[in-house]
Amino acid sequence: MFNFVRLVQNENMKIFRRIGTWVMISLMLLASGVLGILVKQNVFGYDDLGPNWKQKLEKQVKQDQKILQSEDVPPGAKEHYEKNIQINQYRIDHDIVPDGQTLWGYMYQTASVTSLITLFTIITGATSVAGEFSWGTIKLLLIRSASRSKILLSKYLSTLLFALALLALLFLFSLLLGVILFGFSGWDAPHLTYDNGKVIEKNQMLHVLGLYGLECVNLLMMVTFAFMISTVFRSSSLAIGLAIFLMFAGTNAVSILSMQDYEWVKYILFANTDLSLYLEGQPWIKGMTMSFSITVLAVYFLIFNVISWIVFKKRDVAS
């Protein structure tokens, strides 16, 4: 057990000794800071704390109702407009100010920065195994007393620990910066979600923590996929390129296919990675549940790791 812990520590030391790691951390914090300035400067059009916010929402409700009455609206888009209408009307009726230019509105925006963390962790994980082959250090690594399984697991865990460290740093930095930029205005306002035709009030802090927590699922799956490609093909560039391509193209493809009500779409990996949709009560395909998505993800996760383990165990490194 002690030897395994040392293996994980050594892998973490390799990660944080690279200049590129600190460049990635700096870019992540910079992105969060720039995003805060953009929200503060109302670049996204969040003019919702003014005295006329109710009138603006009423106008938006009427526009959405007209669109909803159109015959050209796809079934998936209808649910989107129904949700917006119900939530906006609920805000008007219960005097709940939208949370665009507030601490929580900013925190919701920073959740999107986790895509950068996914990108950086993919790069780190992809080079973890493939880099050993490229640099010719794999032989020195395998002559140690630790088994191949422990070596592979240590690399995988160190990559995940790196991702968790970035997530924690992003959350704390964004929370501190959000308090500085926006204060505590709207701190106690509820977050509104739409589920089964009803608007539900939720605690803002728990919702933000839920968003960050569920982002870990997508991060975990993409890193595991990149780790598998890196192990199988011994090419960090292939693993990075393919994982990044699927990360962006996969979600867009599922979004388009889901509007056509194809039942088989729910079995695609990227239809299940964004579990935050269940917090809003709006899964990609009607009838999907969180337990179903978790089951599908567990199957993919098992397949990716089994392939990585089998290939790494049987890999011939003599040449």
Image (cartoon, rainbow, N blue to C red):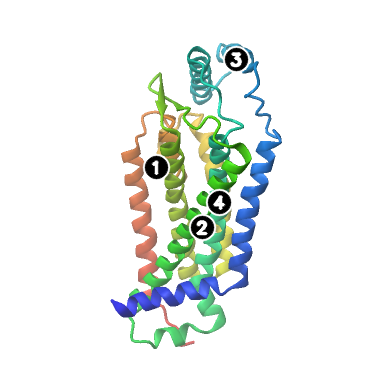
Name the N-terminal-most of marks 1 and 2: 2
Name the N-terminal-most of marks 1 and 3: 3
Can residue 265 be seen from the camera position used here?
A: no
- Please name the residue that numbered disc 4 is placed on: 173
Task: For label 4, count other residues whose C-alpha is less than 10 Å away and answer few (under 14), some (14-19) or many (20+).
Answer: some
Q: Nearer the viewer, mark 4 or mark 2?
A: 4
Question: x and y percent of residue 272 in the render?
Answer: 42, 42
Is mark 2 in CB contact (under 8 Å) with mark 3? no
- Residue at figure coordinates x 47%, y 82% from the top left: 138
Task: For label 1, count other residues whose C-alpha is less than 10 Å away and answer few (under 14), some (14-19) or many (20+).
Answer: few
- Residue at figure coordinates x 54%, y 50% from the top left: 114
Can residue 203 be seen from the camera position used here?
A: yes
Q: Which numbered marker is on residue 54?
A: 3
Name the N-terminal-most of marks 4 and 2: 2
Question: x and y percent of residue 258 in the render?
Answer: 49, 33
Cα distance in 3D space between marks 4 and 2: 10 Å
- Please name the residue that numbered disc 2 is placed on: 166
Secondary structure of the residue carrying tag 1 is helix
Q: Would you say 35 lies left or right of 91 here?
A: right
Question: x and y percent of residue 14 in the render?
Answer: 51, 75
User: Which quadrant holds residue 264?
Assistant: top left
Is mark 1 in CB contact (under 8 Å) with mark 3? no
Q: Which numbered marker is on residue 294?
A: none
Name the N-terminal-most of marks 2 and 3: 3
Q: Which numbered marker is on residue 267?
A: 1
Q: Which of marks 4 and 3 is in front?
A: 4
- Residue at figure coordinates x 45%, y 35% from the top left: 277
Three-letter code for the amino acid on which mark 1 is drawn? Tyr
- Residue at figure coordinates x 59%, y 17% from the top left: 72
Three-letter code for the amino acid on which mark 3 is drawn? Lys
Three-letter code for the amino acid on which mark 2 is drawn? Leu
